[in-house]
Amino acid sequence: MTGQETHVLDGSNDDDRLDAFVPGPRTRIAPTGHGVLDGLRFAVKDLIDVAGVTTGGGNPDWLATHAPAPAHASVVARLLAAGAAVEGKTITDELAYSLEGENAHYGTPLNPHWPHALPGGSSSGSASAVAAGVVDFALGTDTGGSVRVPAAFCGLWGIRPTHGAVPTDGVLDFAPGFDTIGWFARSAEMLERVGTVLLDAPRARGAAKRFTRFDEAFAIRAASEPDDAQALLDAAGLMGALEGVSVFWGDGAQWLDVYQHLQDADIQRSLGDWLAATRPRFGPSIAPRFARLAKLDAAHVAHCAALRARWRARLDAVLDKQYLVLPTTPVSLLSKLAPPAQIAHFYANALAINAVAAFGGYPQITIPFRDERDRPLALSIIGARGDDLAMLRFVRRFDVPSRQDGGA
């Protein structure tokens, strides 16, 4: 395994008071080269391969039925070659099938700035480690919001890139038609710097685009948390999104239905054989989601695919000349003590909002603001496929100096 060896520089995991890292010895790996990431440390979500370490996927049965990775995932290798060091692998919600940040087997990573609240998932450990300053940036995966949601809840910058713009070899397949590798940072500058290493063949955009409010997503947020509606509109206005647009025919419930059926069909193709052979144990909130796979209706899946194609064509036209501005999540925070019904309501609305970028494989960046009560107030922008680096450069104007890396 030349060039792919895992060098455990310090096997201790005793300093993990965040519960962000996977149990057991901490995997630390020295850089393999020099570049724009010299001297930086990063964490790796436990869906992404590190050579010599078994990718656990947040589930003990997955861990028990898989062997150590023979090589680093391409994204890990690129970051090491650019001068960054691996600081450890981080906890994920089980097989990435959640947006809350809880794991029934390994615990819930801390939300460092709002410890009474959930960190968001499924890339919960990565977000926790970045928010606490343990690492400079961290890798996550994002299928239906698994970077964007924890970025919002933990007050971070986060990106879901254009589908296919970052290589996904060496990553646990969940729903490959929607899966992406994203990352977290405490500043827009760091988010962009990592993007210059990871993004393949980014498209250069000539003319600047205007910002337009995505009114349907704002309506979902206003219905879930009306007290924050005006603050979100004010933040969008500061970004220049003074006009709104309606994109879809239908409402959030229909987006959710279409996305869930298409995602579930993808999950069944990628994980169905393992699920049938292993009969894994899942936590109480995750088990019903996997049980739903057995009830897929092929005709309805085909209908959903047709709707997605129509919506994608509409979105392509809208995003050709503008960025859509929208709330990242339906609520600012979700309490650790939230009852199951409230969590289910959050999950449905969060998935509906975050399905929009997934429908067309579009890049989406979470931009952290705070309201007058010092709670997270995250907005996102969605751009056209290939706009990733242009967007990363553009959003730097919205960064707040005190939130820069090394700041408070």
Image: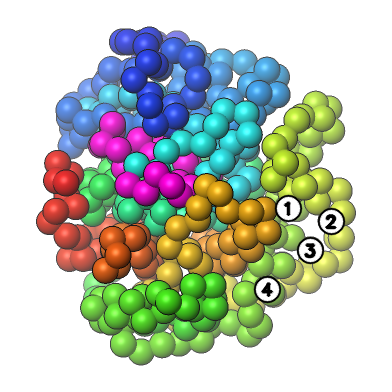
Tag 4: Cα neighbours inside 10 Å, few (<14), some, or many (≥20)? few
Question: Compared with residue 15, is residue 138 higher up or lower down, i.e. above or below?
Answer: below
State the SS at label 2: loop
Q: CA distance from mark 4 to mark 2?
A: 18 Å
Q: Is residue 150 above or below residue 370?
A: above
Specify the amino acid type for callout 3: Val
> Does 247 appear above or below 16?
below
Q: Is residue 271 left or right of residue 360?
A: right
* Marks 1 & 2, CB-CB < 8 Å contact: yes
Q: Main secondary structure of the magenta part?
A: loop
How many angstroms separate mark 4 from mark 1 (CA)? 16 Å
Q: Residue at x 45, y 58 (%)?
A: 333
The reply to whether dot 3 and dot 4 touch (C-beta < 8 Å) is no
Give the label on residue 348, or none.
Answer: none
Q: Which mark is residue 264?
A: 1
Residues under labels 3 and 2: Cα distance?
8 Å
Residue beneath disc 3: 301
Mark 3 vs mark 2: in front: 2
Query: Which mark is drawn over residue 253?
Result: 4
Residue carrying label 2: 296
Query: What amino acid type should be assigned to the residue bearing mark 2?
Result: Leu
Q: Residue 313's image quarter?
A: bottom right
State the residue in front, 320 or 126.
Answer: 126
